[in-house]
Amino acid sequence: MQNEMKQQQINIELGEKEAEGIYSNLAIITHSPAEFIIDFTRIVPGLPKAKVHARIITTPQHAKMLLKALSENVEKYEARFGEIKLEGQQNPPFGFMAMEKEPKIN
C-alpha cells in the first residue's frame, strides 16, 4: 500500500530577534502525562540565580520526535567533525537534565 500523504512544503518565517538566538547551558526538563516542558536557562559563574530565557511546551509524541531528530543530527555531526566529548563529572552541577518535579521558578 502506497503512502497517500504528500509531503507538504512549509514556509517558516524567522524574525530578526529570533534569528539572534539564545545561548543556553542549562535546560530543565519536566513532564506531565500530557506534555513535556523544557526551560532553557543560562548559568553564569558567580551568580546564584539563573533566569529562564525560553520555555518550550510540547506533547510527548513531539518530545520523542525531537529526541530522534537530535540523535540523528548528533550522529551526522560526529561523522563529519568527530566525536563530541563530554568532559568532567558524570553528573555535572549544571547542563541538560531531567527533573523529578517542577523546579522553583521566581
Image (cartoon, rainbow, N blue to C red):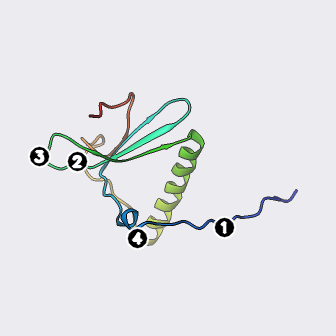
The residue at 57%/46% (across/down) is 62
The residue carrying mark 1 is 9
Establish if 34 lies above or below 7.
Answer: above
At 49% from the left and 38% from the top, the residue drawn is 36
Q: Position of residue 31 (x, y in %)?
A: 47, 33
What residue appears at the point 11 percent right and 46 percent down from the top-left corner? 46
> What residue type is disc 4 on?
Phe
Closer to the eye: label 2 or 1: 1
Query: Between marks 1 and 3, how big is the CA–CA gap?
Result: 46 Å
Amino acid at the residue labelled 2: Ile
Query: Which is more toward the observer, 55 or 93?
Result: 55
How far is mark 2 from mark 3, CA to CA?
Answer: 9 Å
User: Please, what is the three-letter code of the amino acid marked with disc 1?
Assistant: Gln
Q: Secondary structure at mark 3?
A: loop
Residue sitting farthest toward the bottom = 80
Q: Which residue is mark 4?
A: 81
Residue position for label 2:
43
Per the image, the residue denoted by label 3 is: 46
Q: Amino acid at mark 3?
A: Gly
Q: Earlier in the sequence, mark 4 or mark 1?
A: 1
Q: Position of residue 76 (x, y in %)?
A: 50, 66
Disc with the residue nearer the chain's start (2 vs 1): 1
Q: Secondary structure at mark 4?
A: helix
